Image (cartoon, grey):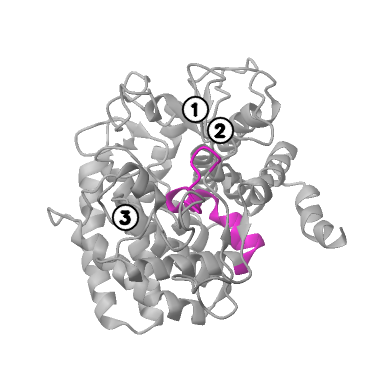
């Protein structure tokens, strides 16, 4: 217990962080133990196809009990900070396993997951594609390669682990080449879909630009002149084209794509890597501040108010149209199960709150920091306080903000994204804009 107290008490006793946020961040760690957790100490009946280095142990959690994919990569991106900060050896081994998987694919694509209990775990990665996209080698989603570049960069940058970077470098370069090949009109932004959304090019662009900035730093460190030149070439296209295509001056935010002026909560998830590790911002700083102000005004504030203060207490809606209604027909589930556009995604809302807080610090706007905490507190209220929901220690992937307490994906991997908000709230050191 002394060892547990050594790292939990500084969090619990930190007076710069609200009690609800400390409680939520610590409580969400339940999933690290109860989330279908797996840790192997050697494979006895065969040689492992991935993660077969001396001293490497494959470990991690399922996406949730309903979606039993192991270490789902797009989802873990929001919550990877918990593993990276608290169990760095596990984070290292997971990312090395994904590097192996990337090297085993035909074109350098990255699997959605490392398998699951329904198949041969680790030896048959991407159970999702087998279940939902039969006939393809890996799930064809746009965010996987940039998120791999970012996650490997963040681990390397935090721990200065050059041996890790050496191991991952071939897979990082394959990820770069694969992503470049998916840009069909040479504007520096992939046309691939992402996380079951259609043509969500803003999300793609921000992830890619910040990944390129991370790659630029790694290539410089490794004296890889060729890759550095290619990275700069991509940045020279992606950043100005993103400003041109997505900034909506009259609305004051970056819109969903070039033709759809909706506002999406998860669109700036790629910016977190830049914010935490001091990379250049994906897009214009003044505009980014305005964008996050609009996220609160349009995605958070209008939702159901539980405590009478005039501000919604549900977190952030996934995507809304100009009338403040669900931005329908942007995901492949529209009209089928009324999924994404009608939901709040818990981990996405926590990450958005962290970004709002960060840009409140950068712009010296205390109201923006306050609004960030209100955004996160709404999710905490629904997951840990609202007895009508009964979500204790089973925080869902999503709930329908017009039909509470309807929810799906109970006990979900991404809700640990609350750590991003807690770490922002306890670290006041940010470069002003």
Residue at horizontal 66 percent and vertical 43 percent from the top: 28
Of the two numbered discs 3 and 2 in the rendering, the one whose residue sits closer to the viewer: 3
Of 38 and 368, the residue lying toward us: 38
Q: How far across and down, in percent of the image, does residue 173 sit? A: 31, 72
Of 83 and 23, the residue lying toward us: 83
Q: Is residue 283 visible?
A: no
Could you say which disc has been placed on residue 364 in the image?
none
Secondary structure state at the residue bearing disc 3: loop
Q: How far across and down, in percent of the image, does residue 317 sit? A: 45, 28
Residue at horizontal 61 percent and vertical 65 percent from the top: 40
Looking at the rendered image, the quarter that the N terminus falls into is bottom right
Of 426 and 250, the residue lying toward us: 426
Secondary structure state at the residue bearing disc 1: helix
Residue 165 placement, left or right of 283? right
Tell me whether the residue at label 1 lies in contact with that at label 3, contact meaning CB atoms closer than 8 angstroms.
Answer: no
Report the residue marked by disc 3.
138
Report the residue marked by disc 1.
300
Q: CA distance from mark 2 to mark 1?
A: 6 Å
Residue 323 placement, left or right of 72? left
Residue at horizontal 41 percent and vertical 59 percent from the top: 124
Tell me whether the residue at label 2 lies in contact with that at label 1, contact meaning CB atoms closer than 8 angstroms.
Answer: yes
Of 227 and 175, the residue lying toward us: 175
Please tell me which of labels 2 and 1 falls first in the chain: 1
**Which range of residues does the magenta coloring cover?**
64-89
Q: CA distance from mark 3 to mark 2?
A: 35 Å
Report the residue marked by disc 2.
375
Q: Is residue 19 above or below residue 183?
A: above
Residue 162 placement, left or right of 374? left
Q: Is residue 225 above or below residue 57?
A: below
Specify the quadrant of the image occupied by residue 413. Answer: top right
Q: How far across and down, in percent of the image, does residue 48 sit? A: 48, 71
Look at the image and say whether residue 66 sits in the magenta stretch.
yes
């Amino acid at each position: 217990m002394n060892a547990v107290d050594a790292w939990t008490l500084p969090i619990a006793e930190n007076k710069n962080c609200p009690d609800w946020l400390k409680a939520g961040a610590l409580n969400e760690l339940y999933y690290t133990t109860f989330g279908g957790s797996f840790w192997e100490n050697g494979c006895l009946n065969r040689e492992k196809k991935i993660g077969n280095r001396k001293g490497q142990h494959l470990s991690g959690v399922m996406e949730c009990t309903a979606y039993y994919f192991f270490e789902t990569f797009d989802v873990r991106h929001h919550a990877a900070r918990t593993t990276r900060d608290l169990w760095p050896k596990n984070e290292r081994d997971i990312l090395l396993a994904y590097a192996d998987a990337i090297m085993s694919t035909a074109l350098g694509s990255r699997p959605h997951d490392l398998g699951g209990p329904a198949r041969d775990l680790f030896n048959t990665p991407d159970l999702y594609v087998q279940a939902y996209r039969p006939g393809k080698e890996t799930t064809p989603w746009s965010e996987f390669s940039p998120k791999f570049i970012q996650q490997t960069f963040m681990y390397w940058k935090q721990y200065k682990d050059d041996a890790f970077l050496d191991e991952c470098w071939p897979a990082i370069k394959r990820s770069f080449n694969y992503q470049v090949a998916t840009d069909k009109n040479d504007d520096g932004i992939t046309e691939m879909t992402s996380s079951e959304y259609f043509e969500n090019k803003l999300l793609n662009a921000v992830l890619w630009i910040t990944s390129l900035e991370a790659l630029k730093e790694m290539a410089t460190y490794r004296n890889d002149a060729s890759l550095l030149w290619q990275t700069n070439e991509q940045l020279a296209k992606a950043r100005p084209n993103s400003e041109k295509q997505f900034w909506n001056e009259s609305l004051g935010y970056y819109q969903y794509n070039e033709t759809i002026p909706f506002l999406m909560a998860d669109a700036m998830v790629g910016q977190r890597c830049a914010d935490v590790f001091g990379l250049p911002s994906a897009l214009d700083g003044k505009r980014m501040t305005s964008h996050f102000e609009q996220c609160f005004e349009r995605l958070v504030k209008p939702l159901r108010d539980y405590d009478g203060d005039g501000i919604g207490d549900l977190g952030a809606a996934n995507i809304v149209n100009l009338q403040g209604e669900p931005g329908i027909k942007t995901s492949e589930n529209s009209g089928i199960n009324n999924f994404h556009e009608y939901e709040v995604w818990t981990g996405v809302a926590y990450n958005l709150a962290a970004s709002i807080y960060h840009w409140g610090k950068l712009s010296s706007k205390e109201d923006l920091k306050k609004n960030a905490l209100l955004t996160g507190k709404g999710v905490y209220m629904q997951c840990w306080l609202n007895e009508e929901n009964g979500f204790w220690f089973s925080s869902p992937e999503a709930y329908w903000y017009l039909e509470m307490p309807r929810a799906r994906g109970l006990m979900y991997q991404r809700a640990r994204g609350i750590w991003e908000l807690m770490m922002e709230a306890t670290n006041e050191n940010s470069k002003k804009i």
